[in-house]
Image (cartoon, grey):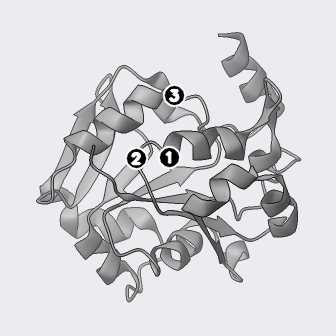
Amino acid sequence: MKKINSLLLTAGFSSRMKMDKALIKIENEYFINIIISKLILVSDNIFIVLGHHSDLIRKEIKKEFLEYITFVFNENYSDGMYSSIKKGVESSDNHTLIHMIDQPFISNNFYIDFVNNFKDEFMISQPLHNNKVGHPIILNKDIIKKMAITTDNNLRDFLKPFRDKMNVFVTDEEAIFHNINNQEILKKIISN
């Protein structure tokens, strides 16, 4: 089984949700612990980027997960998600799966198949369902080194020059499109 690093983004305000997404519970389990349990399947090193509510989030992570985790604090978390990605990858020395905090419904098998499908020659790997790409994504370790010194303002602009070496991973998982920004979206997903 191939292992890569993972980067879990939890630094944002979750302002539209009106509560921190990392600390939403489903079936009595926090989003953050659900996702970590899945990332452990493919990662020995999980970098969790903290910002807003960092102490609350750290406190709720299961103790048995801590051996896999390195906490990274993004003091500039108010600058947006890309600032958290850049901060998080500073410590990564391997291909890295970048994961949003509001995607706890992706299946375990997806992670194993997605990572096993990744090859060193790919610069980017992104899941594809019904001809539409989603998240999480995997970035080659060579891209990550360049990201640390980029002046781009967002991930999409930074990745443009590398699109010719992008791999798409075809999947049946609709959860790769989840963007849980409010309670109504969450209720709709849970009820399906």
In-front residue for pair 48/144 = 48
Residue 134 figure quarter: top left
Q: Is residue 78 left or right of residue 178?
A: right
Judging from the image, what secondary structure is the residue with disc 1 in? Answer: helix
The three-letter code of the residue at mark 2 reads Val
C-beta proximity under 8 Å, tags 1 and 3: no
Q: Residue at x 80, y 67 (%)?
A: 54
C-beta proximity under 8 Å, tags 2 and 3: no
Judging from the image, what secondary structure is the residue with disc 3 in? Answer: helix
- Look at the image and tell me whether residue 133 can be seen: no
Judging from the image, what secondary structure is the residue with disc 2 in? Answer: loop
Task: Determine which of the numbered discs, if any, sits on residue 39 in the image.
Answer: 1
The three-letter code of the residue at mark 1 reads Leu
C-beta proximity under 8 Å, tags 1 and 2: yes
Q: Could you classify mark 2 by the number of other residues whose Cα lies within 10 Å: few (under 14), some (14-19), or many (20 or more)? A: many
- Nearer-N-terminus badge (1/3): 1
Residue that mark 3 sits on: 175
Across and down, in percent, residue 162 comes to: 20, 65
Across and down, in percent, residue 170 comes to: 26, 29
Q: Residue at x 31, y 45 (%)?
A: 126
Task: Determine which of the numbered discs, if any, sits on residue 42 in the image.
Answer: 2
Distance Cα–Cα, label 1 vs label 2: 6 Å
Q: Quadrant of the N terminus?
A: top left
Distance Cα–Cα, label 1 vs label 3: 15 Å
Position of residue 127 relative to residue 65, above or below, is: above
The three-letter code of the residue at mark 3 reads Ala
Across and down, in percent, residue 130 comes to: 32, 22
Position of residue 122 relative to residue 94, above or below, is: above
